[in-house]
Image: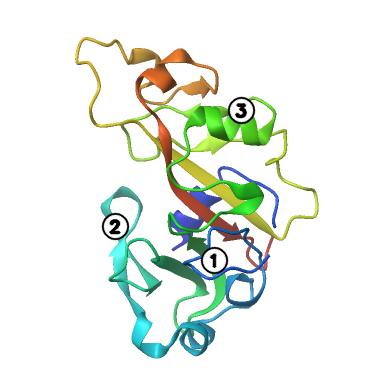
């Protein structure tokens, strides 16, 4: 879980209003999405039959414990990781479904240009095609982290699997920092593939 949490902290952002997974509305770091959330609260909110806790894929091919809400409905699936795996309390991170807007209105499926327009300021993206690739780094603009933020937004971007094979993608491959106005991002149809909101641990 700590490995996943550290990834989510790569890109910090502002917070925003409660929403159910089926709603394309703003997100709030409160209630089930607040730092004091728990598996018990998820069951109370969504119904125990819609909440499953178990091992899920994590970073570098390792499994980790997480609680999944609506696991059989990809459009509504939420995944929660805990600060305390034993008690399943203290929210470490939550992955949002494509039908829910995250902080500032960002959501899965957005192009880089759309996120850029939403943010109002340029940002960078880590190079693609490696374990930690595609994470956004937004230091200024509408989506930039507030000094007193209680939770942090991480965006991961992924290129389309279909692009011209003769296209030179060296400039966006591996451990590089890609400016948000890089023309290759549009040619590769790069879009937001993950919206994760994470929370600082007690020591932080």
Specify whether 25 is left or right of 71: right
In the rendered image, the vertical position of residue 12 relative to residue 178, given as above or below: below
| Number of the label disc, if any, that sits on residue 62 | 2
Residue bearing mark 1: 92
Which is nearer the N-term, disc 2 or disc 1?
A: 2
In the rendered image, the vertical position of residue 61 relative to residue 1, given as above or below: above
Q: Nearer the viewer, mark 2 or mark 3?
A: 3
**Percent position of residue 126, x then y:** 47, 30
Give the SS element for disc 2: loop
In this orientation, which residue lies closer to the viewer: 98 or 83?
Answer: 98
| Placement of the N terminus among the 4 image quadrants | bottom left
Q: CA distance from mark 3 to mark 1?
A: 25 Å
Q: Are marks 2 and 1 in contact (CB under 8 Å)?
A: no
Q: Are marks 3 and 1 in contact (CB under 8 Å)?
A: no
**Residue under the image location 66 percent in, 35 percent down:** 119
Give the SS element for disc 3: loop
In this orientation, which residue lies closer to the viewer: 161 or 59?
Answer: 161
**Percent position of residue 29, x then y:** 66, 66
Residue 128, picture quadrant: top left
| Placement of the C terminus among the 4 image quadrants | bottom right
In the rendered image, the vertical position of residue 114 relative to residue 173, given as above or below: below
Q: Residue furthest left?
A: 165
Q: CA distance from mark 2 to mark 3?
A: 30 Å
């Amino acid at each position: 879980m700590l490995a996943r949490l550290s990834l989510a902290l790569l890109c910090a952002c502002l917070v925003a209003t409660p929403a159910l997974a089926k709603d394309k509305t703003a997100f709030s770091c409160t209630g089930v999405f607040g730092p004091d959330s728990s598996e018990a609260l998820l069951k109370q909110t969504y119904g125990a039959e819609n909440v499953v806790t178990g091992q899920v894929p994590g970073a570098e091919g390792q499994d980790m414990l997480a609680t999944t809400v609506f696991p059989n409905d990809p459009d509504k699936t939420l995944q929660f990781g805990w600060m305390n795996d034993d008690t399943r309390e203290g929210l470490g991170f939550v992955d949002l479904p494509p039908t829910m807007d995250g902080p500032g209105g960002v959501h899965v499926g957005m192009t880089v240009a759309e996120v850029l327009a939403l943010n109002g300021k340029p940002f960078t993206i880590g190079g693609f095609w490696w374990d930690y690739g595609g994470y956004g780094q937004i230091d200024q603009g509408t989506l930039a982290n507030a000094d007193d933020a209680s939770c942090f937004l991480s965006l991961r971007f992924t290129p389309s699997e279909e692009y011209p094979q003769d296209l030179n993608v060296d400039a966006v491959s591996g451990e590089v920092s890609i400016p948000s106005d890089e023309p290759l991002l549009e040619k590769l149809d790069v879009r937001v593939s993950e919206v994760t909101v994470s929370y600082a641990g007690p020591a932080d």
